[in-house]
Amino acid sequence: MVKTLIFALLATMCATFLWGCGGKVSYTTVDGTMLGTTLHVVADVQGTSPQELYAAVMALDREAKASMSIFDPASLLSRLNRNQTDSVDRHIAFNLRLADSISSLSDGRYDVTVKPLVEAWGFAGKEAQENPNVDSILAFVGRQKVRIENGRLIKDDPRVQLDFNSIAKGYTVDLLAQLVESFGARNYIVDIGGEVRCKGVNRQGNPWRIGIETPFDGNMSNGEYLQRRIGMTEGGLATSGNYRRFYLDAKGNKIAHTIDPRTGRSAVSRLLSVTVAAPTCAEADALGTMFLAMGADDALAAAKSMPRMKVYFILADGADGYEEYVSPAMKAAIMQ
């Protein structure tokens, strides 16, 4: 993937294809980096050059990171976590509201106050503690310990900290979709680091095809190993897994980045990958984290209790192979 504006513009292309009832539709493709990961946009924007679209996308990138990044010490979220301000913007307010709706489905397994735990285990830009004092950290973890009143963030304990990494990327994908629609796009796919929002059809007039990676430990390939493909014409899609961001502790135990906020420890189970399709990518992003944090048995039970939920699970079958669960609502989207 390209790393700078110059390379991004060199890699940006515009091509014209025919589909439908003989109409000519021009698709613009932009590749680059956003939120520190890969960016891919294909959209039938009208009257806009690739350079103009790229500039608008980069402005959105700066806005999202300035608001929600836990890695930028100057971001609004970082300052809220350090109690240097209590004013929230529209992005943080939206994500807290959505987090509440997902948390209500999760029996406490989805919680955006997990930052102190994520940090203690070495997944928030700091070195892992050798033996984190989980019990002491859990004293100031809990979604009920923070709220917004009149545009202000109120904490029951000043040590409470927020981490939107389970939702902010999906939310930014949704903002990116709104951006390309503002340029007149009716058919598009936008992708930030594998999280996707799409509408309409691709250049051939078919549903957009999204690959789901095979979840073996350390799979850092860019689509070389795919388990399934999913076809979509509208909505968001996100995949969560513990096969990339993990390490082994001194005893050889796998420590993964998905933390169960009830126990304060990694949520490692035979559930290896969760893919969720939802009306928005923010919902898909948060729900994927929720199911992964539940572990295999509880996630399967929860998914089966919500038959309208579009989910695709990949689980270890105990014999170096994989077991799959496709919810009834997702079956039509799975491509052979």
Image: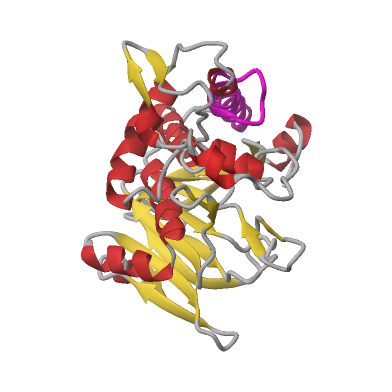
Residue 55 counted in the magenta span? yes
User: Horizontal and vertical percent for residue 262?
Assistant: 43, 50
Magenta stretch prevailing secondary structure: helix
Position of 259 compared to 97: left or right? Answer: right
Q: Residue at x 74, y 50 (%)?
A: 130
Position of 217 compared to 88: left or right? Answer: right
Quarter holding the C terminus is bottom left
User: Horizontal and vertical percent for residue 139?
Assistant: 48, 36
User: Horizontal and vertical percent for residue 221?
Assistant: 69, 63
Position of 94 compared to 165: left or right? Answer: left
User: Horizontal and vertical percent for residue 292?
Assistant: 46, 59
Q: Is residue 226 visible?
A: yes
Q: Nearer the viewer, residue 279 or 251?
A: 251
Q: Nearer the viewer, residue 296 or 263?
A: 263
Q: Residue at x 32, y 54 (%)?
A: 21
Q: Quadrant of residue 174?
A: top left
Q: Residue at x 61, y 30 (%)?
A: 70
Q: Residue at x 42, y 42 (%)?
A: 111
Q: Is residue 336 visible?
A: no
- Residue 33 position (above or below residue 328): above
Position of 94 compared to 114: left or right? Answer: left
Q: Which residues are magenta?
A: 50-76
State the residue lying farthest toward the bottom.
319
Render colour scheme: secondary structure
Q: Nearer the viewer, residue 188 or 70?
A: 70
Q: Nearer the viewer, residue 191 or 135?
A: 135
- Residue 284 position (above or below residue 125): below
Residue 111 counted in the magenta span? no
